[in-house]
């Protein structure tokens, strides 16, 4: 018997946000990731957003929203969704064929950090620190204290705390509103 999984990006991602304009600065890129997170909460998803960009052109290759609750799969974190759809868009299992970066509204959890290691990305840009997600009730899993250095050793540059307060506010608002915490425990 054949089995199939299908992930679908939400319609609002393409109708409510501008995914076509190039973004050059880290702040412009992060604004879009935060806007994805905020819109996602408004549409019943988790408070995380991510985009994969072509670093040379500033063009968004793929966007990802946290789809864990709406699509019923614990793997569908915003970073995973963005990476998977970017690879599908480029028809490649790796993003190393070009110069691609992941911009995410929060530092990656242990699952997403693993995906960054293997994805072929050249750069990671993070908004809210891990502590903001944990303070909102999310279990981000165990990470090495040297995770940034470990990524750098793999050729992945890390820039963190870009618009961190604004990104953290999405997480705090989600927690205050009683948003679903979909931790395994």
Image: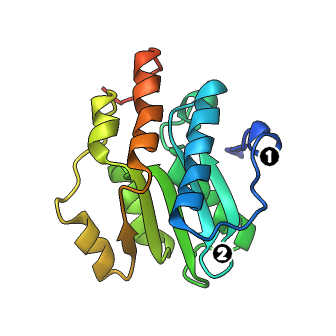
Going from N to C along the chain, the mark reached first, 1 or 2, is: 1
Query: From this viewpoint, is residue 83 visible?
Result: no
Label disc, if present, on residue 101 of the rendered structure: none
Of all residues, the one furthest to the left in this rendering is: 145
The residue singled out by tag 2 in the image is 92
Is 159 on the left or on the right of 185, as rendered? right
Classify the position of the N terminus by image quarter. Answer: top right
Describe the element under mark 2 as helix, strand or loop.
loop
Q: What residue lies at 41% left-to-right and 17% top-to-bottom?
A: 176
Above or below, comparing residue 74 to residue 26 in the picture: above
Above or below, comparing residue 169 to residue 63 in the picture: above
Query: From this viewpoint, is residue 98 visible?
Result: yes
Mark nearest the camera among 1 and 2 is: 1
Is there a contact, CB below 8 Å, between mark 1 and mark 2? no
Of all residues, the one furthest to the right in this rendering is: 15
**x and y percentages locating residue 13 in the rendered image:** 74, 43
Q: What residue lies at 35% left-to-right and 30% top-to-bottom?
A: 184
Describe the element under mark 1 as helix, strand or loop.
helix
Q: What residue lies at 49% left-to-right and 54% top-to-bottom?
A: 104
Is 182 on the left or on the right of 92, as rendered? left
Instruction: Work out whether residue 30 or residue 119 is closer to the camera in this orientation and state it.
Output: 30
The residue singled out by tag 1 in the image is 14
């Amino acid at each position: 018997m054949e089995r199939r999984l299908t992930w679908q990006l939400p319609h609002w991602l393409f109708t409510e946000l501008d995914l076509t304009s190039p973004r050059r600065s880290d702040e412009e890129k992060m604004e879009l990731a935060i806007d994805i997170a905020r819109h996602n909460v408004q549409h019943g998803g988790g408070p995380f957003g991510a985009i994969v960009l072509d670093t040379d052109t500033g063009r968004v290759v793929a966007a990802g929203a946290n789809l864990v609750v709406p699509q019923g799969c614990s793997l569908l974190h915003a970073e995973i969704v963005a990476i998977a759809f970017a690879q599908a868009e480029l028809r490649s299992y790796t993003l190393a064929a070009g110069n691609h970066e992941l911009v995410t509204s929060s530092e990656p959890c242990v699952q997403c950090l693993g995906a960054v290691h293997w994805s072929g990305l050249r750069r990671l840009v993070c908004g809210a620190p891990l502590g903001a997600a944990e303070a909102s009730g999310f279990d981000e899993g165990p990470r090495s204290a040297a995770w940034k250095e470990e990524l750098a050793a793999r050729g992945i540059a890390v820039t963190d705390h870009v618009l961190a307060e604004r990104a953290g506010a999405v997480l705090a608002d989600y927690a205050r509103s009683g948003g679903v915490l979909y931790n395994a425990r």
